[in-house]
Image: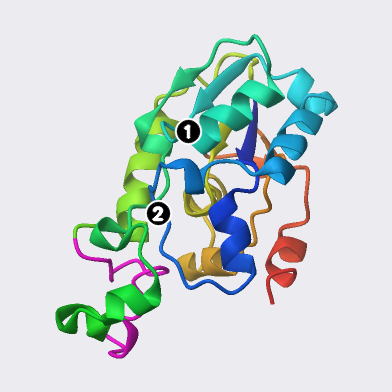
């Protein structure tokens, strides 16, 4: 079996953050979190990728940016929407900038207190009403364990930055688990795993250490 993990195309929100906006996106699902023109073009280009062409089952997050990417990469192809593949929730912070959050005295600790300020990348800390990486690992593993590994399928999974990091952890059994915080998951780049059970999958498309190195 092959598992092809694909992060959605670049969004307006992604580009704004690249340009310096301190924003919490999480499961934000509005127009601002939708694909920009670069994201649309990259998703269309995926349709020409040989590995993507050979995908015969498609699973997609329930957030629109992932759905739109899948539609462009696999046009006229049936896909299954899986809520467990959505991005990590940032709770009440979603759609808000750092400046907006800091204006509320009860939330200032999330940017000033070490016991709270890792809420975006932590297995224990989380935003109010949001999720941490432990929560995301739990739900993505529920999905992965539901797959039938006895079939010779090539499965495409269109998902998100943090969610794909957590699938790397679950598939490759990374040690220490905090290593996933160093993984740079690029938009519209297929990450391919091959194996016959969840215990023996290998990353065949990339050198793992290069993915980690590229984020340093």
Which tag, 2 or 1, sits closer to the chain's start?
2
Residue 104 numbered tag: none
Residue 116 painted magenta: yes
Q: SS of the residue at dot 2?
A: loop
Q: Residue at x 68, y 15 (%)?
A: 75
- Residue 196 can be seen, yes or no: no
**Vertical placement of 138 versus 63: above or below?**
below
- Give how far across and how far down residue 120 sits, in percent: 40, 68
Among the 4 quarters of the image, the one containing residue 182: bottom right
- Give how far across and how far down residue 184 sits, in percent: 65, 61
Residue 26 numbered tag: 2
Among the 4 quarters of the image, the one containing residue 156: top right
Q: Residue at x 59, y 74 (%)?
A: 20
- Give how far across and how far down residue 26 sits, in percent: 40, 54
**Vertical placement of 37 versus 216: above or below?**
above
- Residue 41 can be seen, yes or no: yes
Nearest the viewer among 180 and 159 is 159
- Residue 210 placement, left or right of 115: right
Measured Cα–Cα span from mark 2 to mark 1: 13 Å
The residue pinned by badge 1 equals: 64
- Give how far across and how far down residue 148 sits, in percent: 49, 18
Mark 2–mark 1 contact, CB under 8 Å? no
Part of the protein shown in magenta: 111-128
Chief secondary structure of the magenta span?
Answer: loop
Q: How crowded is mark 1: few (under 14 residues within 10 Å), some or many (20 or more)?
A: many
């Amino acid at each position: 079996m092959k598992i092809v993990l694909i992060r959605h195309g670049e969004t307006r929100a992604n580009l704004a953050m690249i340009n310096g906006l301190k924003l919490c996106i999480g499961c934000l699902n509005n127009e601002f979190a939708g694909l920009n023109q670069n994201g649309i073009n990259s998703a269309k280009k995926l349709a020409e990728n040989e590995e993507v062409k050979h995908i015969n089952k498609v699973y997609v997050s329930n957030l629109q940016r992932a759905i739109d990417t899948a539609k462009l990469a696999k046009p006229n192809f049936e896909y299954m929407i899986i809520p467990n593949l959505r991005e990590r929730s940032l709770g009440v912070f979603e759609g808000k900038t750092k400046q907006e959050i800091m204006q509320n005295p009860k939330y200032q600790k999330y940017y000033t207190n070490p016991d709270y300020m890792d809420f975006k990348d932590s297995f224990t800390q989380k935003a109010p009403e949001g999720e941490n990486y432990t929560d995301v690992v739990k739900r993505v593993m529920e999905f992965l364990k539901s797959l039938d590994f006895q079939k010779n399928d090539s499965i495409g999974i269109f998902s998100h930055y943090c969610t794909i990091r957590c699938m790397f952890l679950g598939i490759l059994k990374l040690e220490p688990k905090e290593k996933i915080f160093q993984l740079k998951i690029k938009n519209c780049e297929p990450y391919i795993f091959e194996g016959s059970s969840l215990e023996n999958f290998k990353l065949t498309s990339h050198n793992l250490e290069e993915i980690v190195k590229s984020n340093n």
